[in-house]
Image: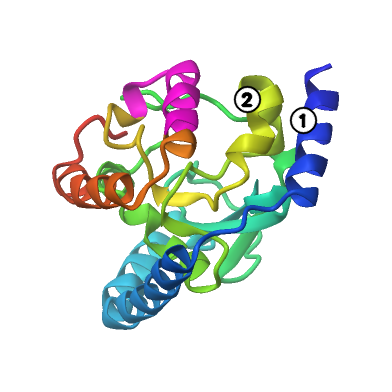
Amino acid sequence: MASQQLTESLRLAVLRPPSPPKLWKLIEAGERISAGTLLLASSPFLLLIAGLIAALSRRSPLIAHRRVGQGGRAIWVLKFRTMWDGGRHPWPGLIERVAETNVRIVPKSANDPRVTSRFAAICRHHSIDELPQLWNVLRGEMAFIGPRPLTRSELADYYAGDAAELLTRKPGLSGLWQIRGRSRLSYRQRRRLDLFLIRQWSVRLYARILVATVPCVLFGKNAW
């Protein structure tokens, strides 16, 4: 039943895309320019991180997870790899694509046994692993602020009939629940905050979340 509700929600989201005002179009353009500038400026750092992960994991340093974007469209969200088992695996290239059917979403924990590297844990703690998503912002698939990109199964299990409302906005690098508790929050709490963000969407709220994200990333509070 939840899966059927999600399918209908996705269909409605595609049929009724939002019509952002001119101000939001300017903000979107500014985000894409800023994302490109940040990618260019941080490219030596990103290459260093990629090289260290490739050396430590002996696997592709980047992973692309399939998620549901604005209007129900599938997008490939980039991340640095932070989980590996030390075994021998085929090398698929710079980026390993992971379809949702191959992924079981498991809630994060402070001492996640899947994170076997101290370096990887630091990357997760300070959101370094999510820096490649600036590429998604540059492509116009994501925004700086918005609900986090989810899989179809997460939407079906935790959002169901509210999925269409959630998908009226682009998924974001940061959002309301990322600055209000982050990893320690349950899916139910994240859903409530995501929907509040959508329903109270404003430039003021966008700016407040953007500013609050900086110390959250620097200090890594409630992140694992």
| Residue 131: quadrant of the picture | bottom left
Q: Which residue is denoted by mark 1 in the rendering?
A: 6
Kind of residue at badge 2: Tyr
User: Foreground: 115 or 178?
Assistant: 178
Looking at the image, residue 99 sits to the left or right of residue 133; the answer is right
Q: Give the camera-side residue of 103 and 16.
A: 16
**Residue at the image position 33 percent from the left and 43 percent from the top:** 117
Task: Kindly tell me whether residue 215 is visible in this rendering.
Answer: yes
Where residue 2 appears, as percent x and y from the top left, is 78, 19
Would you place residue 170 above or below residue 185 in this image?
below
Location of the N terminus by quadrant is top right
What residue lies at 45% left-to-right and 63% top-to-bottom? Answer: 24
- Is the residue marked by circle 2 packed among few (<14), some (14-19), or many (20+) residues within 10 Å? many
On whether residue 195 falls in the magenta region, the answer is: yes
Please tell me in which quadrant of the rendered image residue 73 appears: bottom right
Tag 1: amino acid: Leu
Give the prevailing secondary structure in the magenta stretch: helix
- SS class of the residue under badge 2? loop
Magenta residues, start to end: 183-196
Residue 5 image-quadrant placement: top right
Left or right: 66, with 41 as reference point:
right
Q: Which residue bears the numbered disc 2?
A: 159
148 or 19: nearer the eye? Answer: 19
Query: Answer yes or no: do the residues labelled 2 and 1 have beta carbons within 8 Å?
Result: yes
Q: Looking at the image, is mark 2 or mark 1 earlier in the sequence?
A: 1
Q: Secondary structure at mark 1?
A: helix
